[in-house]
Every structure is written in C-alpha cells, then in structure tokens.
Amino acid sequence: MPALIFIIALVIQGCSTYSQDINKGLSLAQEGDWQAAESTISNALESPKDKLLNLLEGGALAQYQGDFQRSNTLLEEAERLSDAFFNQSFTDRSWALLSNPRQGVYRGDSIERVYISYFKSLNYLALADKATSQNERTQQLDAALVESRRIDLKLNEINQQTPSYSDIKSEKKSFLEKTFNFLSSLYTGYLDKDKYAYRDDAWARYLTGLLYEQAADFDNARISYQAAAELYETGYASQYDLPSVTSERAWLDTIRMMQKSGGWTTELPQLIQNKLSKESQEILLNYAQHKSEIVLLEHQGFLPKKQEMSVLLYGDQTGYSLVLEPFYGGHTAQANDASNWFTMVYADIHPLSMIANYKAGKANAALQGFFTKRIILGSKIWQELTRLHFDEALFTSPLRVTIPYYNPFTLDNSLTSLSISSVAEDQNTPSSARPDLLANNSIRMSSLADIALQDQLHQSQRDIYEGLLREMLRSWLAYQVKASIKDDGTRELIDLLGKVVVFVSSAAETRNWLTLPAQVRLIRQPIDSGVYDLRYSVNQQHFSLNQVKLNNTIKVWNIRNPN
C-alpha cells in the first residue's frame, strides 16, 4: 500500500505540472507567440502517453508559424499513430482504470482525425501558392485533393455510425428500440445524446469543394459544395448555432460549379429561385463578370479547455441505490458552472425520475433529484455488492468521482472588413490613388467550440459511469489491502491513508487538441484579374497581405487570429 500511495502521489504531481504548463503554453498562443507556445506545450506533452496530442499541437502550431512542410510531417505521423491507437491495449486500459484516465495513452477522437486531414489540406494549398513552377504547384494541389478525399472517407465512416438529421427528425426507430431507450433513460438521465453526436462536418465538406474548385475539378467541387449545403440546411447550422446563410452560401457555390461544368440548364433556374435570395442572385451575376476571386478563411480563437468537476458518490441502502451529487469547490463562478452542467446533463429532473426518487427515498427525495443523480440498483444487485464487501469498501465515507465538462463560452461576433486595394503593375500609381473595394460581414461557417461541447454532452453518460466504476474498484482494492493487515493500528492507518489517496487522486480525462480554432469565418469576393493589397480587420486586429497577383485564379488567404 505505501508503494501505491507513492505512485499515486507522483500521478497527482504530474497532473498538476501538466495543467500548469499547458495553461502557460495556451497563454503564449493567445498572444500569437506561436514558437514559444509550441516549445512550452511540447514540454508539457513529453510523456509517451501524450505523443499523439504532442504531434497534433505541434502540427497546428507549425502551420501558424508558416512552416507548412514541417506541419505536414508532424500531422502525417499523428495520422499513423491515431490509426495505430484504434485498439487500446489491455494493460493501458487497466492502468488508466486503476489510476485515472490521464495516465492512459491519448488516442484522440473522430473530430481530431478529420481535422488532421483538414490542416494538411491547408498546408498543401499554401505550398502550392509558394510553388516556383507549374509542375510543383500541380503536385501540391494534387496532394491537397488526396487529403480532401481522406476527409470525405473519414466523414462517411462517422456518418454510418450515427443517426442522420433526417433519422432524428422522423424518429426512424423500431418500437423495441424506442422502448429500450425510454427505459434506459430513467437511469441515465433524459439527455438525448443522439442529438449532440458529431455525425458529419458541413464546413469540412465545403473546404473539399474549394480544393476541387482550385484544381478546376468542377463536378467534384459541385458534389462537395452540395453535400455541405444540404448538411447546413437539414440540421448542421441549427445544431451548432450557425447563421442560416451558411446553407445559402454553399448553394451559391454549388450553382456556380453547375454553371462551370455545364449540362444543368434544366435544373439551374429552379435551383436559383428556390435556394438563393435576391442578394445572393446578384452575387452570382457578379461572379459571371469577374474571372478571379479572393477567398478569406479566418480561423479565430481556440477551443475551450475542458474542466474537471467533482461528484460525491454514496450509497442509500434504504433505496438500494447509489447517489451522486456535485462536490462544490473553487470560486463561485466555477462552482455555479459545474452545478449547472450537472443539472443539465445528469440530474433526475424528469417527472418519471422524480417518481423513482420519491419511491426510493425520503419525503424530500423527489425534489432532491434536481440536485442529485440516483442510480437504482435493486435489492438483488445490492445483496451481491454486500456479499463482496463492496458496501464496507464504499460507504463508510463518500467516494469522489471526477468528470469532464466545459465552462460557458461566447464566440467572437465582431464586425469584420476586408479591404482590397488595386496596385498598378508598373508600380508608378500608388494603391491609395485607387478606390478600395470593401467586403464586409464574414460568415461563421463552423464553430469547433460548439462541436467540442456537444461531443462532450454526447459522451457524458459514458464519462460518469466509467468514473463511477473506476472509483468503486479503486476503493474496493484499497479495502482489500486494509483487510489483509492483522495489526489493528496499522490497519486503521492504512485505511485512512488509502481513503485519502483514492479521494485526492481521482481525475477525469481533460486532454484534447486545444490549439484548434474556436470558429471559422469566411469571406469570398469575386474580382478582376490584377495585383492587389489586402487588409483584414476584426475586433481591433489588423492583418495584411501585399502584392497578390491574380490572373483568372483563386487566392486563398488563410488567417490565424488568436483573439
């Protein structure tokens, strides 16, 4: 037992150091000091268990520094590693169960796998822009298209494993499945996790359309743009709190690709009338009058950092059940956020859950469900726990279960402005002598912050039950060690130390790819061929790009705005 206490103490110290270093690295990133941020975060993630996360953060930060080739190298290794981690080893899972999830190998999730290819495609697009020959440019664009196909394959795989928006709306489920879900919800809360699943990514599909358009593959561009438009329209924009104009923008680009590829003369008039407002129809006409285009992608902010909530677990023998309730700590705002998350996700606030609480508990048990989560085991399971001495191990004092959650956040909604100044190619006429073209009000096309939050909601029940199982098992093992000691004094000391160590070493999985942007905003402006200076302004931040030469081409300007 002393050895176990020493190991867990090291675990606690390691978690503390990790959190401090990550926070320092994120602060540097928020200041735009990408190089220092990469060095600090890399040091915080030097453990072999964090190798995948280290590669992901390094790949993103290398791109923000303009080191696109190194970014691709890191992300390619991350891609291989994420595939290798598809099956987690028994040893790794067992150690994570006996200590805490932070001690297991970080495996990533579906969103991160998609955005590995997303970042690589942007890297190849930037490398194509820097190419010194047409052959090199073609090679880089081809590599970007390979990543776009990977995005498509990954999203198709995710889509097959989750209900579609149409399935949720029409509730295409068998009677048996509906009945099972209804009954299980009495024990797991009334959060319909299917509504929060990451089932597809309209913005990632839209970007693949842009990549195909860059390569003049207009038919595949149409397919990708249309897939994005239909996703935005049927539920994606609503799920992630995006403006409704996102679907219209994607339909506009779908129609443009139809016009370029030809053969859609019958479908186009009706599609234009049904999908485009008068303003968008004017933009469509503007495209017909200009052969070049500026596409601005603003990747703004950072994903919110996962927080850790403590929940007390104790047994209610009269109701044959386990009861969970928030353990309040920290400053008031943090405690309120944790309490609100618990009520929103776990608390027994549905009328049928209140009835179950009333039947299982005391006079105020029904109302108590607003602040607690009761897991009713029944007399038979309770008797089995008693036979195995779980009751002695668990309920002489409450256990601490930790679960991840997100604090509330607000995305930046500042007005944006893109200023386009023409420059005479003979350099004798200053750009200030010519009027500027202003493109205002970018469109929020994606909110990765909302995706992350809803993905956490989607897996929230799994989190709490894994945490519950982990703490019950760790407490029971500590009890077994105590029970094997004959000397009364030593046994009581070990019992006290074991309870303290198990209590304070409880931790949740709060690791994720934190340098991903919180949101992506888009401006597209058709324009004549020529040479231009570009200025982008948002929330007192100013970005510039000089001497952009367009000759019947698309210029993609990828901005990383940390604020």
Image (cartoon, helix red, strand yellow):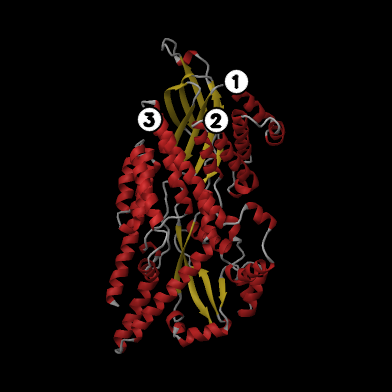
Q: Is mark 2 on a helix, strand or loop?
A: strand
Of residues 270 and 284, the one drawn nearer to the viewer in this rendering:
270
Residue 226 occupies which quadrant of the picture?
top right
The C terminus - image quarter:
top left
Q: Is residue 243 left or right of residue 5?
A: right
Residue at the spot of label 3: 136
Question: Residue placed at 52% from the left, 70% from the top?
Answer: 325
Q: How far apart are marks 3 and 2 (CA)?
A: 26 Å
263 w.r.t. 233: above or below: above
Q: Which residue is situated farthest in the front direction here?
A: 263
- Residue type for callout 2: Arg
- Residue type for callout 3: Glu
Q: Distance between the residues labelled 1 and 2?
A: 15 Å
Q: Which of marks 1 and 3 is nearer the N terminus?
A: 3
Residue at the spot of label 1: 289
Name the disc covering residue 524, or none.
2
208 w.r.t. 314: above or below: above
Question: Residue placed at 40% from the left, 34% from the top?
Answer: 140
